[in-house]
Image (cartoon, rainbow, N blue to C red):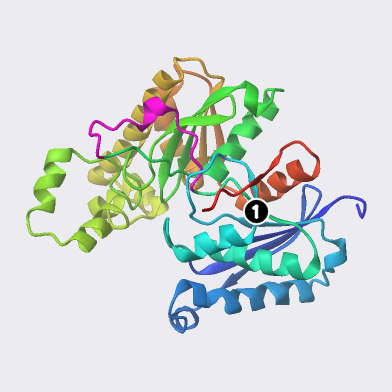
Amino acid sequence: MSDKPQLIIINTGSTSTKIARFIGGNLLEMETIQYSNAELAACSTINDQIPLRRAGFLKFLADKKIYWEKVSLLVSRGGIGRPTPAGAYLIDEAMCRELLSGKFGTHPSALGPAIALDLAREYGIKSIVIDPPSTDELQELARISGLPEITRKSAFHALNQKTAARRLARELGKKYEDINCIVAHLGGGITVGAHQKGLVIDCTNGLSEGPFTPERAGALPTTDLLHLAFSGEQKNPLMLKIVGRGGMTAYLGTKDARMVETMITGGNEKAKLVYEAMAYQIAKEIGSMSAVLEGNLSGIILTGGLAKSDMLTAWIKKRTQFIAPVFVYPGEDEMLALAEGGLRILNGEEELKKYPAD
C-alpha cells in the first residue's frame, strides 16, 4: 500500500470543511469540521475565513500524522470561476485571485484552492481542482435562449454528474469518452445533463431552469414571473423565493423528502401531487435531453441524495425507461470523485490544464 500515491483532499462548503486522505483509490480517513454560526459571524467576509479553515486543515494533518514528503498530490474542490471545459486545473495565483475576488460568484468553495496553493508552495507539491462548478461544455446550439440579450449559461453539478457517467462507462466496459448518456443529479438542486462522448453538450441551469426541486422553483412561466416581479415584490426576496424557498418548500413547507414521503404514506394527497409533479418534471427534462442526443444513448443515470428515494425514482423510471436503461447511483461522493480525478492526473490518463485567468 505504501507504494501507492497518497492524495489529500479538501472541500470547503458553506458551514464545513471536509478533509480526506486516500491511498490510491482507497479512503484511509476523512473528517468533517463543522463551524458554528458564531465562528463564521466573526469573519466579516468569506475570505476572512481562510485562517480558520487553514488551522482546521493543519490540525487534521497533525492529528493523523500525515507527512508532506509522502503526499503525491493535493486536490481541492473548485470555486466559482470563469466558464471552462471540465477537467483538472493546476491551482495557481491567477486562479485564486479570481476566485477570491468574487468576479463570477462568491462561495466558500473558493477557500479550498487558496489554502491548497499556500500549502503546496510551502511543501513543494502540486495542487489541483477537478471539474469545477463553472464547467462549461455547451454546444453553440444550446446557448441560444430566445432573446439575444440573454445567453443560456452552464451551471450544474459537474463533479458528481461526470463521476456518475464515468461509473456507467466502466460498468459497460467502455470509456466515458465513447458513450452518450443522460445524468440527472437529484438533490437540493436538480440538474439534468446530456453527456456526449465525454462532453456535457447541454444541461439545465441549476439556478434558473429545469424541474423544481426541494427548495428551488426551477423554470417558471415567463409572463407570470414578470407579473410577479412587477407586483411590488423586491428583487432579493423574490430571488430567495425562487432559489431557496421555492419548489417543494413553497408548496409543502419543507424541503425534507423523507418528511414528504411520510406525509404521503399518511394519506396527504397534496404532498403526493407535489412530489410526483417533481418526478414528472425531472422525467420531462430527461426526455428533452434524449432529443439533444437524438435518442442515441447507453443509459439514463439518477444520482444524488434524492436518488435514495425508491418512490421518486420509481416515478421517474416509469416515464423514462422506454428511452434507455435507467441506472440508479444513490448519493454522491465528492471526496472520492476528487481523488479519482487526482489519480487520473498521476496516472497520465488526463492532461493537467492551466486556468485561463486574465
Q: Amino acid at mark 1?
A: Met
Res 31 visible: no
- Front-most of 231 and 252? 231
- Magenta-colored span: 134-149
Left or right for 83, reference 61: left
Q: Residue furthest left?
A: 231
Read off the residue under disc 1.
335
The residue depicted at 54 percent of the width and 23 percent of the height is 299
Q: Is residue 141 something one can see in this rendering?
A: yes
Q: Position of residue 353 (x, y in %)?
A: 65, 44
Image position of 41 with respect to 175: above or below: below
Residue 155 located left or right of residue 325 = left
Q: Position of residue 240 (x, y in %)?
A: 27, 59
Query: Residue 184, percent across and down?
Result: 47, 36
* Residue 314 on the magenta segment: no
Quarter of the figure with residue 59: bottom right
Query: 328 or 192, which lies in front?
Result: 192
Q: Position of residue 114 (x, y in %)?
A: 61, 66
214 shown above or below 322: below
Which residue is at 33% across, 53% downward? 215
Q: Secondary structure under badge 1?
A: helix
Q: Residue at x 55, y 68 (%)?
A: 16
Q: Is residue 147 magenta?
A: yes
Q: Is residue 124 depicted above or below 202 in this figure? A: below
Q: Main secondary structure of the magenta part?
A: loop
- In which quadrant of the rendered view does residue 62 lie? bottom right
